[in-house]
Amino acid sequence: MTDNNREGTPKPEVSGRRPNFPTRRELRQQREALAAEQARRQSPGGQQVPRKKPTEVPATRAARSDASPMRSASTSTPSPRQTRKTDHPRRDARLETQVTGKQPTQPGRRTLHNDPLTTGTRSRRLEAERKRVRRRRRNAKIRTAVILMSVIALIAFCVYLAWGAISRSTTSAPEEIDYPGPGSGSVEFVVNPGDSGAVIGSNLVAADVVKTQEAFLSAWNDNQAAASILPGTYAMKKQMRAVDALSALLDESNRTSNAATVPPGFTKQQIAERLSAIGEFTTEDVEAALNDADQLGLPPEAEGNAEGWLAPGTYEIHSDDQPADVLRRMVEATIKTLTDLDVPPEQWHEVLTKASILEMEVNIDKYYPMVARVIENRLTETDASTVGLLNMDSTVNYGLGRTGGIPTYADTETDTPYNTYMHKGLPPTPISSPSQKAIEATLKPADGDWLYFVTVNLDSGETKFARTPEEHEENRQELQQWCDANEGKC
């Protein structure tokens, strides 16, 4: 066994081994030795104080363990080079390292690694910061991945929809619901104003142009231009594919228009003249149809008179149509309007008569409800200044076979069933074909106590309302001034 406790410089530690630190007893002995050395150096007169021999201290615990399992009684005494303080800080530091075995603390330098409290706090703080940084990076990657996946999913969905639309537009309906085409023969097909895709499809099936309504509606839904089909007569083939039939209806060159338009306020005589001018009908044929209530489908409330029951609108005339066919569609449209507005059948005749007068008296929509109120007030307030008389110029003109203009005093004195200046209440029949707006205003007149109204400007349609005869006379004078300034218009 090698003796490392002999006097002299201790054997240096093997590089890489953990240093062995002195015990508290050894540190106390070393401090006593250092204190004695300092006292000797600082004695007065420069006399040296006899140095007390310090207790020998083993250099390291490793030396004691290497020398013997039993602690040796002999100790090594540090040399003056080891224990003497100098004025040089680096030398003092080395001396303190040799004596204590610890690294000295340098001024202005923090020794965090040698302080267990500081080392633990800072380590935890640094570790927490590293975790936050890693968490932020991980969250950023997750967000980026989610955004990329959402964009890819959206693009894929759009591609799916586009591909489906292209596939549907290029794929015809199955043979069990559609004809293989291309069709044969010829047939005239009419699209009426307001016909929907379902109505057109049903009519095409009835004409044997397409096999099923389902096949046509499938082609209709796949073609955005289908809603632009115009009313008219089209030359078609029988047993066509649905997509081919739709293409034929969208072909403007395949369309011929043979439509008759009936404006609101037309009388049945004017409608007969219009049909004779557009269709291949004679005036005699149209008048004969007007007098056939059964062919027209007139309800019992009409009492055989078609006046007021021929709804305004545009009607396609088929090549094989008869006058009664076209007039029947007009009557059906009027009945449908009354039914949709929940008018009881026993009131149909009265409502149409009031609405027909309203249609002839008003040419601006905002005045419909107001004039409707005047009609109601005159009919119900029999003790008012109008004494139950309508006093309507339009009824006087109708009784005289005219459709417009201002009747003269002599006209108002002419006795006809339609002269409401002479006969109280409503005339016996409607006097024109009322629009749906006129019918609605008749059912819901405006609030007011008016008994009189007069249009003071026949060009603009400006109308003024009054309750008393005096106010009404002032408005009539304004109309007369306008007539004087516009000769030939009244």
Image (cartoon, rainbow, N blue to C red):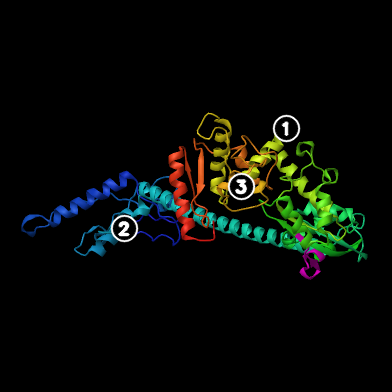
Q: Position of residue 161 (x, y in %)?
A: 72, 59
Q: Is residue 200 left or right of residue 64?
A: right
Reply yes or no: does residue 257 show up in magenta. Answer: yes
Of the two numbered discs 2 and 3 on the same chain, state the one appearing first in sequence. Answer: 2
The amino acid beneath tag 3 is Ser
Q: CA distance from mark 1 to mark 3?
A: 25 Å
Q: Does residue 43 sit above or below 302 in this rendering?
A: below
Q: Nearer the viewer, mark 1 or mark 2?
A: 1
The amino acid beneath tag 2 is Thr
Kindly identify which residue carries mark 3: 394
**Separation (CA) of disc 1 from disc 2:** 125 Å
Q: Pointers 2 and 3 in contact (CB under 8 A)? A: no
Q: Nearer the viewer, residue 328 or 487?
A: 487
Q: Which label sits on residue 97?
A: 2
**Viewer-proximal residue among 164 and 92:** 164
Is residue 220 or residue 368 the one in the foreground?
Answer: 368
> In the image as oriented, which residue stretches furthest toward the bottom?
253
Task: Estimate how packed mark 2 is, as few (under 14), some (14 to 19) or many (20 or more) residues with alpha carbons within 10 Å.
Answer: some
Residue at 75 percent of width and 53 percent of height? 196
Horizontal and vertical percent position of residue 73: 35, 46
Which range is magenta? Answer: 248-259
Mark number for residue 346?
1
Q: Does the magenta run of residues contain 171?
A: no
Earlier residue among tags 1 and 3: 1
The residue sitting at 22% across, 48% down in the picture is 32
* Secondary-structure class at tag 2: helix
| Amino acid bearing label 1 | Glu
Identify the secondary structure beneath mark 3.
Answer: helix
